[in-house]
Amino acid sequence: MVDRDEKLKDARRALRAGRFETALERAKELFGQNAEDGEALYLAAVAARYAKRFDEAERHLADLHGAMPEYGRAWQEQGHLALARGGERAALSSFMRATRFNPALEASWREQARLLEKEGRSAEARTARRHHERLTKLSRELVAVTNHLAEGRLARAEEICRHYLRANPRDVEGMRLLARIGIELGILDDAEFLLESAVAFEPDDIQLRLDYIDALRRRQKFAGALEQAEQLHARDPDSPIFQSRLAIELIQTGDYDRGLEMFDAVLERLPRDPASLTSRGHALKTKGERQEAEESYRKAIAAKPDHGDAWYALANLKTYRFDETEIVALRDQAARADLAFMDRVHLNFALAKALEDEGEYAESFARYDEGNALKRAQVRYSADTMSAELGRQREYCTPELFERHAGSGHPAPDPIFVLGLPRAGSTLLEQILASHSQIDGTLELPNILALAHKLRGRQAGEPRYPSGLHDLSSEQLEKFGEDFIKDTQIHRGRAPFFIDKMPNNFRHIGLIHLILPNAKIIDARRAPMDCCFSGFKQLFAEGQEFTYGLTEIGRYYADYVQLMDHWDDVLPGKALRVQHEDVLDDLEGQTRRMLDYLGLPFEEACLGFHKTNRAVRTASSEQVREPINRKGQGAWKPFEPWLGPLKAALGHLV
């Protein structure tokens, strides 16, 4: 490592001194040892350009894009190379991509402004010029923080930012950047406080308000996020940025009609904006307007053929089948070396689904495996850490804990928690129950997970949750339950009961019982191979990191079964287990069983669940709009030759 660092320094010194051939040779020595050494490839590309060896520079940049597709400096260098070769249109595209990945690249903003002006795109040129001017006025420390943040060096970014803010405690840009770091690290309460304070200091700063809205939404403060978005929109009702942000917040709070009106307004001005077209498609899908959603996704792909989100959105309809022309296009896009990270992930999963439908199981599995491997490397999930976390629930959530707190908590009987593993049939159960006149369906509410995170604390060493449950007072438990009822109100209609379908709540049944002792809990369970392989094939938006590997998801399922056995022991009768296969065999019998457990009368509408008109936000949204069927049963069997690691992880459960 020391030898590498010295060689990098030597290459940089040679580059600064104008000894381009020497710099190039030093860089080649480094990536000769490691073909994916991004810094060495970058230096080689810069040196080759200065040496006017343009073809060689192009090759080094192609390798760099393959190794680090979202490295902003690489795209800035691509822009410089395009200019050196006389390609202004290609240069502009590269500089725009560079600032998308790293907004601290001053040269890219400067060149964008110049090239956009030459093309007569004056409004966009003014925006680029404003970004450039803002960077030139920003302190050297905060430019460095922005760079480190964009390139994933969060610890270094936080260190510099905190040091700067100690000397400049009211600097709103420093506060904003520290909040962004907090969001990346999942420290959302601190991020919200920083942004709220910064907005108070500079109420007219648009970027601050946009970031504040983001923090509020992540904190599940949807009413507050919507209020802020409404304020921004009132400032400039014709701004596509403000219209788009308001559309997102409206849809998040269930106002789909007005949200779609906002997206339509954005698309009047930006008819080929792939992000807006895709978001509009998501909203239409959630509403159940299938054909309109497909059309919106296809328009996004036409506007940007490598837009992986739209390709995967079509695949994620589950009942959609790609035609031969689309599969050829998918293959072409997936083969590109210059894909952004998430585009590559999305395209792998979409192509895997297309190939599965065609019966090409070996290649389909290879694509699922590659997409999951990319995500697994990104999230760095540890099955051992998760097993230990669930083990602590069994250790501390004892009969003595529940005896000590008997009679505590908030008495509301309103919540019905449907939990288990994702892809276990919980959306079907929710749709059945939400077809009842006295039950509102909502979505996968993160409130319980957020409370557990808060109770865990941030001190180094042993977390305070769940051990700290023993120390909570009756007043605290009641307040937590009251807050849950109040904070989830925004998602409810007028029915006396509502469903929280967050699957991972099974980890926190002890906490749920302490704060809401009258809540009902339904454990949605599915046969292990069907459940786990379905999860492996599903690209989740967030929060289900255990699905990105066969061993990981198998271990998680086994840990889940063990923890549910524990809850059955310490809280007998608390949770009703509903086996997915039993629902397929006897829909009416299992529906009556659930309603009996909930203390509600049977209603025929529950059996016609597929006719219920409500927004469904999960991956099963299209499937639950069909009558009961067995399409998903045994879907793993054609892939059995590659599922050895999953079977081994499941052990005796298979």
Image (spheres, rainbow, N blue to C red):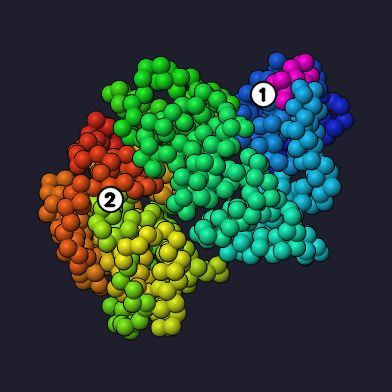
Instruction: Tell which of 110 and 290 is nearer to you.
Output: 290
Mark 2 burial class by Cα count in 10 Å: few <14, some 14-19, many 20+: many
Q: Which residue is the site of mark 2?
A: 431
Q: Which percent across, then down, holds residue 404?
A: 33, 84
At x 46%, y 45%, the residue is 257
Q: Quadrant of residue 65?
A: top right
**Is residue 81 at all visible to an observer of this figure?**
no
What segment carries the magenta color?
81-92
Q: Which residue is the site of mark 1?
A: 60
At x 45%, y 71%, the residue is 483
At x 36%, y 40%, the residue is 288
Position of the N terminus, as image quadrant, is top right
Q: Which percent across, then down, holds residue 187?
A: 57, 61
Number of numbered discs visible in the structure rendering: 2
Magenta region, mostly helix, strand or loop? helix
Instruction: Tell which of 283 and 417 is nearer to you.
Output: 283
Q: Is residue 566 left or right of residue 466?
A: left
Instruction: Tell which of 591 and 619 is nearer to you.
Output: 591
Mark 1 burial class by Cα count in 10 Å: few <14, some 14-19, many 20+: many
At x 77%, y 41%, the residue is 131
Residue 474 against residue 183 in the figure, above or below: below
Q: Quadrant of residue 119?
A: top right
**As shown in the figure, which amino acid type bears the numbered disc 2?**
Gln
Q: Distance between the residues labelled 2 and 1?
A: 53 Å
**As shown in the figure, which amino acid type bears the numbered disc 1?**
His
Label whose residue precedes the other's in the sequence (2 or 1) = 1
Q: What element carries label 2?
A: helix
Q: Which percent across, then down, holds residue 282?
A: 45, 39
